[in-house]
Structure formats: C-alpha cells, structure tokens
Image (tube, grey):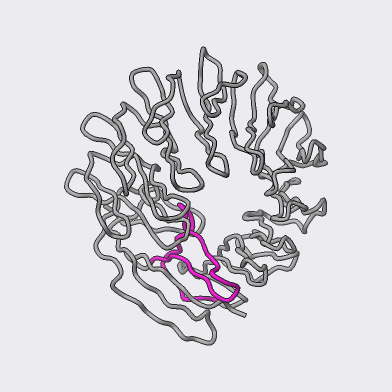
Amino acid sequence: MQKRKIIILALLSLVAATAVVAGLKTRWFTDFTRIWVSEKMIAELEVFSPEFFMVSPDNRRVAYAVKQGEKLCVAVDGVNGKTYASIIPGSLVFSPDSRRCAYAAVTSDKSVVVVTDGKEGMPYEEIGENAPVFSPDSRKTAYAGRKGDTWFAVLDGKAGPGYENVRELVFSTDSRHFAYLARKGGRWVVVRDGVEGSTYEGIGNLMFTPESGEIAYVAGKGADAVVAVISGREGPAYDSIGGLVFSSDGKRTAYVAKKWPRSMVVADGTEVPVDDGMVADTPIFSPDSKRIAYSITKGDKWFAVTDGKESAGYDGIKGLVFSPDSRHTGFAATKGNQQCVVIDGVEGPLYDAAGGPVFSADGKSIAYAAKRGNRYFVVSGGKEGPAFDALVVGRGGRIVFDSSSRLHYLAMNGKAIYLVEGKTGK
C-alpha cells in the first residue's frame, strides 16, 4: 500500500493508520533566522488517512484508526482501544474540552457508538452521518441510529421517538437544549427538546442562536422558494439561501441569498447585492459583532469585502478572518501560480502555497502555513519555522497561539507526527 501525506489545507484520501510509537523524541532548534521551536513526536503512522484521523480542539492530542489483522481499532495518543470489524469513516470526534473521544464502529452485524471513557452504546443497524456529536460542555453525546426503516435521535444512550429519517443533531451553546431534523410523513420538522415544530418540504442549516437558545434554519417552501426561519419567524423568499450565521452576541444575522439574476448578502434583514458578481462564501462577523466581511467574485477576480469596502482583486481568496480584537482582517490570496497572506490590505511574501492567517488573542501576532517546493512550514512575524514533509491542517489540526509570543501546531516528517512548540517571530 502506498504511503500518502498531508498537504496544507487539503488532506488526501487514504485508508487506515497503524500506530508504532509515541512520545519518544524531542528536538530543539535555535536559529536566529527562524522561529525558535521544539518538536516532540506524539505518534508514528504506517499509513495516514484523513477519514480515520482527528486532532483534539486543543491541538495536542490525536486519534486514528489502527489496523490489527483483519480488524481495526482506534488509538488515542498511541493507546489502542477495542478492535472492531471496521471504524466508520469520518466518525472520529473529540469533545470540546479535548478529554473525550468518540466514534462509530461496526461489529460483526451491527453498528455502535463508542466513547473512549465510557461504554458502547446500544447496537443499531446503521449510525447516521456526522455522528456522534458532543455538547459544548463535553458532557453529553448524541447521534442518529436506525433500526429497520425507523431512525432515532439518541441522546446520552436514550433513543427518542422514531422517524423516517433523522439528521443535523445540534446542542445549544449552554448545552441545555438539544434539537435535530426529522422526516415525518414525507416532510421535515425541527424537534427541539422533544417538541416538534412546523413542517416544511426541506430544512437545513439547523442551529441554535448563540445567546437566546432559539432555533434558526433554512426551509423550503414550494418548488422554487426558500426562507430563513429565525426564532420561528420566516424571512423573505429567495431562489436559494446558504451560510446562515449569527454574530457572537446573537443579535445580528447574515446569509447569502440568490434571486435571479442577483446574488446578495442579507445582513440584519437588509439586502446588499453584488453588482455584476456573486457572493463566494459565508459571511463572517467580527468578534465584537460590529463588523462583517465576505468574499465576492467578479469575472475571473476575487475580492474581500469588509464593512462594504472591496480589497484589491486576486485570482482566489480563502481563509478570510477577523483578529480577536476585531481591528484587523486577513486572508490568503492567489496571484497566478503563487499565494500570499494579506493583512489589512498589505501583501506578504509569495509562496507556492499559503494558508489563511491565524491571529493571537490580542491581535498583535500572526501566523500561517506555507509551502515552498515540497516542504511545509509555519510563518510568523515574517520568519519561517522549520520545514516538514507536511503540516497537519485540517481534521481539527491548526495553528494555535498559547500567548502573543508562543504558538504550537502539528507536523509530519515521514511517518511521525510531531507536536511543535515555539516562540513567534517578531
């Protein structure tokens, strides 16, 4: 079987991984042209697969499938769990506090959800997609399970009423409420804390509002119309709606809408059309909820729009983000065959590839992943860290600032995954 590698912002498709060793080696770098770093090996994989791999939210733990004979098990930090006939691809997930891991597995004839610090759940004939789900406080788990032709939402091991289908299981931000979409009589309904709401021909983008714990979603009305439903109130109808988001204080909303022939952002109920162009991605609010940004395309050029002002045009834009103090914006831009990071309109150096920027909590430091040739590294303060075969960016892997002067991330050399820690460039 051929070994594959991670690439920045795109994890290639492979099969299962085999753990060999963890935590055996630490290497230190001191180079005045680079970020000062140390690296510690935390796992070694025979084969890497993004569908059987996950990084914890604190970016310090990894879980992955391990092949043992004809069976598979899940290893967390190099410690193997129970073996199963197979592990369901894409089901690995860590709790928000990074202490627990859960996944869906197949026994000889049934499927079960396993939480690594608890017991197996009840067997089902099928476990739903994107399962299981942890509550924000990490205490509860939920997933969808099928018996015969009937689907159930399972909350902490207890099945709810049966439906034709169940999907999009979500918790409120305070973990007190639970909701999901259920198909009943050929139509879809939101079930919140066991109570059914209005039915529609189709529903998606289900979420709780950040502060009030109310429900929001996008629903289909008739053959050609969709509406945003927020706290039980329907908005205007459009040909399509996507990317429904709330500001962090829960008081503002935005989404992308299309009404032939125009594309627009609908922010707080006000339409902002894009003249001769299209909205390219989901809008984002600044952490203080006062600012909004999104990307648009006009012809063959991309533009970042922040507070209604367009950036210079590029061949592509990704990773648009506000700094935590809401004062700065950044994104990765494509220029021909190369990419750079743009902060407040100022372009950084060009690389063969560059990831979207990450800001420290105080907004004073910036870091991003970059590639030159076949080597990958992190750039901070204009200085390059040590080069690796790959950076673990995706499936939970990311660059994390521990303070404005320190960061950590995961990287790969050969089969080994390293926890890399160091000081930021200044």
Viewer-nearest residue: 263 or 91? 91
What's drawn in magenta, residue-wise? 384-412
Question: In this image, 116 relative to 31: left or right?
Answer: left
Tell me which corner region of the image, top left, top right, bottom left or bottom right, holds residue 415: bottom left
Q: Is residue 63 above or below residue 421?
A: above
Residue 175, percent from left and from top? 53, 42
Q: Is residue 234 above or below residue 342?
A: above
Viewer-nearest residue: 316 or 309? 309
Residue 337, percent from left and from top? 60, 61
Residue 198, percent from left and from top? 62, 19
- Residue situated furthest front in the rendering: 176
Residue 138 counted in the magenta span: no
* Quarter in which the C terminus is drawn: bottom right
**Residue in the picture at 46% in, 69% down:** 375
Residue 185, percent from left and from top? 51, 12
- Residue situated furthest top in the rendering: 185
**Residue in the picture at 76% in, 46% down:** 298
**Residue in the picture at 32% in, 49% down:** 117
Question: In this image, 185 relative to 45: left or right?
Answer: right
**Residue in the picture at 74% in, 43% down:** 251
